[in-house]
Image (cartoon, rainbow, N blue to C red):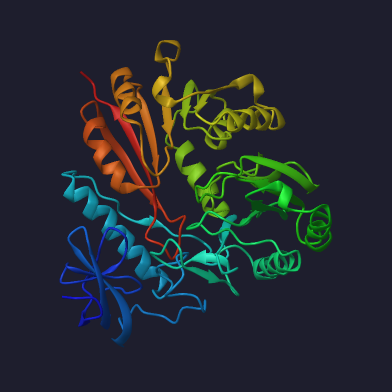
Amino acid sequence: MKFGDIIHGTVSNVDDKGRGLIDDKIAIPFTSPGDEVDAMFQKRDKGLKIARLSKVTTPSPDRVEAPCPHAGTCGGCLWQHMEYGAQLKLKLMMINRAFEAAGHEERVEKIEPAPDTFYYRNRMDYVFGWKGELGLKEYGQWNRYLDLSTCMLLDKETPTILQIIRDLVAEFKLDPWDSKKYTGDARYTVIRLGKNTNERMLIFLVHDFNRVSEEMRTEIVKRLSPLCTTIYLGENPEITDVSYAKSFILLHGNEYLTEETNGIRYSIHPNSFFQTNTAMAAKLQSTVLDLIPSKGKLLDLYCGLGFFGIAAAKRGLEVYGHELDAPAIELAQKNSDSNGVADKTRWAAGTVESLDWSKEKPDAVIIDPPRAGLHPKALKALIENEPPIIVYVSCSFHRLVDELKQLKTKYKVESLQALDLFPHTPHVEVVVKLVRLTN
């Protein structure tokens, strides 16, 4: 098979990335089981043939008209073409398929659905393309960009804000960053929302502060302050294509964004991690807290700005939180103070794998690692120190099933739950309660 060849067939499955599969050999993004399609062969990748959807000749009963005009091309949503109930069924199948393939007997029974499937996110990172586009990358592409006129992930004001930024960049002749040539200055526009506080933070990220004149900074504030409670100018002088600023200049408003979850208010820095679905984050927090004791000592690993730890302290536990990111630890302390639990919490920065377990004898441990999962040394230390209860919050069930093989040498799975924090994507949050085996 060569590039451009036409493939006709019926999608019968999805792969681990959520792409429709024909005969378990041909992966076609933006399709779902039951679709009869024409597709164009693109390339081979890790044993699969990858094709681009040309036409749906007979739609699946689960196929719906995607409301966003960019659906089917944009990398922000892979499953907008699919009815939400069908999305949940597919996610459930994908989780349990991974557990079965890894040799685990446990299964997830259902997925907690999201109350909102559009405008549910509290953060989006919109990238500048080398031709001046401002939006998101095309699905599966690293250097092709969509100039978004609509985005149904954040809020209805987003397109207006993006257009103001485009106008400012053009007016002040600021070149967009070219990630191939490493030239230009305008890199990202990051928008963060306090869904429950009606706050909005905007970070205009550039390659070099000095390229943004005082006049442009003044105009940014003038045009965007009616829509934003906080405006930052951020700088990333590195060539790496990330929306993480190395330094900031506060142009307008408060230093932090505030968000409220289950009655707890959190201060959030521009670079802070916070669960991106506020409504489902509240359910996730409650789910996790219901799995740990109501008293005793809690070790909160990968604690971030204290999302789980502070809520646990409010319930009466003594909490020690450990996290690599030192600014996040400073925020955890600040958030502990503002929520009245400073006397029940301790926080420290450092790698989780370097934690001195001899000083900690927790009754329970919460682990909420990044998508890459636990560091091997952190996993080894966790197993060797045998805390009575571990609650593992995983945003990558593919990594989770591998790590459970080792964890189950000392633990049994007492509870396994899933929550959908990411509608219209194949991603899902899985929460596992592990209880130490008795000798």
Residue 422 screen position, x and y as percent: 46, 58
Image position of 354 with respect to 102: above or below: above
Taking 259 as reference, is 43 left or right? left
Point 43% across, 37% down: residue:
368
Image position of 106 with respect to 120: above or below: above
- The C terminus: image quadrant: top left
Q: Which of 208 and 18 is in front in this view?
A: 208
- The N terminus: image quadrant: bottom left
Which residue extends farthest bottom?
Answer: 57
Image position of 273 with respect to 28: above or below: above
Which of the 4 image quadrants contains residue 80?
Answer: bottom left
Which of the 4 image quadrants contains residue 226?
Answer: bottom right
Residue 12 screen position, x and y as percent: 21, 73
Which residue extends farthest top?
Answer: 358
Point 48% across, 20% down: residue:
297
Residue 26 screen position, x and y as percent: 20, 70
Taking 62 as reference, is 276 left or right? right
Q: Which of 137 and 302 is in front in this view?
A: 137
The answer, for residue 265, to whether it is visible in the render is: no
Image position of 35 with respect to 224: above or below: below
Q: Which of 86 and 192 is in front in this view?
A: 192
Q: Nearer the viewer, residue 162 or 206?
A: 206
Residue 412 screen position, x and y as percent: 25, 32
Which of the 4 image quadrants contains residue 49?
Answer: bottom left
The answer, for residue 291, to whether it is visible in the render is: yes
State the count of labels. 0
Point 50% across, 51% down: residue:
241
